[in-house]
Each structure stands twice: as structure tokens, then as C-alpha cells.
Amino acid sequence: MSAPCPAPKVVKQAIHWMLKLRESGYSPILKQQCDEWRKVDHDHELAWQRVLSLHQELDLQAVPGASIALQTLETSQQRLHRRQALKLLGSVALLGSAAWLGKDLDAVATWTSDYASATGGRRSFHLPDGSLLQLNTASAVDLAFDARQRLIRLKRGEMMLTCEESQANGRPLLVQTRDGLLEGFEARFGVRQDGDCTRVSVSRGKVAIHRPGKGRLHWINEGQAYRLDATGMRSLEQADMDASAWVEGLIVTRDMRLGDFLREVGRYRHGLLGCSDEIADLRLSGVFRLEDTDKLLQLLPQTLPVKVTYRTRWWVSLERSA
């Protein structure tokens, strides 16, 4: 159940057409030639729509240096590989916003994902077996459902899965992450893949963790949360944030460090968000809505001795107020 993906050379051609049109001021003659190219083959149209989506995602008209970033991607031999793209974009960091675009090149990865969400977005899907899959910001999964199993591969980000035993038909429901294989049993559970670990929290039912070479299963029951990484797994006893609140569009904190809170909010917005070291250890508790992160940030000076500074639209920092 893989999403169709045009050949890299066709994607390169689509990017080339996009750049030519932009440079010409969208010349009617060039537009007609581009339209004719799109009609030649279905892959041409598919590649064009995906490049157009990336164009809109990056807001090229408003972001200085974005077209140069796309040109860099066009000439890259690894232009559809995120890590390589980030390295290339790093070489044009002096253009300002081009380096920031690296964060949002996850949009490219959605082209080959069965289900995905954009930065700041949340999406819900009913899977072929009737299970409910919910994706948090900038997340992507692939499905491999067959006669033997129902496998969900979490490629990046965070998901919530609600499954019923009646949907199984003898096939286990598995979630594969970088750090382990999870099996849900009439459960509602969240899985988050960070850069250095996988976090699992169970709201209902139970989940089994399969660890390669570890032999026996480890069970996570309702109300429990665990962290998995290359060194092993450990229970998360006192969480400073509600692991499932994002499903309702909220961040719910309990005595959370300001630095950690801003890192979390940063997942839901484009650009850079941070604070000075002298206020990073300030603590906050509360319920915050994610629908508008700029409004969310404006609430912080009401409870903490901080001020919010917009250096640019995409570069926001917090400092101690006078």
C-alpha cells in the first residue's frame, strides 16, 4: 500500500520548470510549454503537483533564499534524501532563511509516505481494518497490511492508535519504530519517535514491546509510559507533559522547564524558537492551545518574567524581562 512516487529525474524536471516559470515572471509561453510537458505522462503531472505542494509549503514568495535552496536540491544527486538535503542547505546558511528551510524539508518525505501530516497539522485516518490512526505535527507512517499481519511503520513524528480486538481477524497489529516493535491489544496508545529514543504511552488496554534479541515480551499497561532507546528501556514515572493532549490540540504541562516547553512548541511552527540560558530553567504549568502558537507565546509574559522578541517572522526568542 505504497503511495506512487515519480522517478527522481522527473522530479528534477518539474523543479526545473518551476524555477524557469518563476524567473520568467510566469511567462504565458513558458506556462503553455510546461502544461504540455505535464500532459505527456501521468508521472509528469504527479511530480509537478508534489513540487507545487513543496513550493506552497515553503512559502517561496515570502522566504528569502528559498529559490536558491530549491536550485541546490535540483542539482543534488540525493535530492530526495532529507539528510543530504540538510547538508546542502547548510552550505547556503548565509542566505538567512535557506538554513531554516531544512526543518521543513520533511515535506519532501511525505511524497513516499502512505499517511503524513504537515508542520503544525494534525490528521486522523481510518485504516483498512477500522483502526483509528491520528498523526501529530510533521509525522509520517507507512502501512503493510496483508493476510498475516497489520504493520504500521512510524517513519517520523508522533501517532496515536486506537484498535479493537474484533478488528484483528487473527492478524497482530504492530507498530515498528527505530527502537522496537510494539503490539497493541484492544488499546489506545501513543508512539513518539524522537531523535534519540521512542516514547510509548498507553491510555487504554495494553501494549507488548518486542525487543530484538531480548527474548521475552515486556508489557505496558494502561496509564504507563516508557522510553526506548539503543541502550534499553525505562519507565517514565513523572511526566512533565500530558502525552496525549495533542490529540485535542493542547499542550498540558506540569512544572515543565521553559526551555523544554519552547522546544515542544517549536514542533508546531516553522522557523526557530528558543530562549536565553538564564530563563531556560524557569518552570510553568498550564493548558495551552496549539491552534495559534503566536498567541500561545504571548501568554507567557503573563505568568513568567519574560519578554517575546520577534527577530524575523520565523526567528522568535524569549529573554528575561527588565
Image (spheres, rainbow, N blue to C red):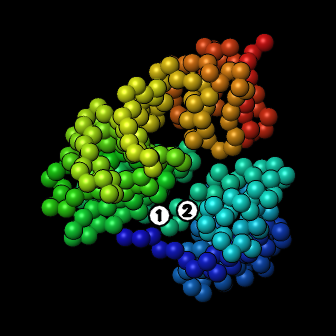
**Tag 2 secondary structure:** helix
Mark linked to residue 197: none
In the visual, does 321 lie left or right of 289?
right
Q: Residues within 10 Å of mark 2 (few under 14, many from 20)?
A: some
- Residue at position x 52%, y 23% in the image: 256
Instruction: Give the residue type that dot 1 points to.
Output: Ser
Instruction: Give the residue type that dot 2 points to.
Output: Ala
Which residue corresponds to mark 1? Answer: 113
Location of the C terminus by quadrant is top right
In the visual, does 285 lie left or right of 233?
right
Image coordinates for residue 101, horizontal then vertical, percent: 70, 53
Image coordinates for residue 205, horizontal then vertical, percent: 22, 40
Which residue corresponds to mark 2? Answer: 109
In the visual, does 194 lie left or right of 105?
left
- Residue at position x 32%, y 42% in the image: 189
Marks 2/1 in contact by CB < 8 Å: the verdict is yes
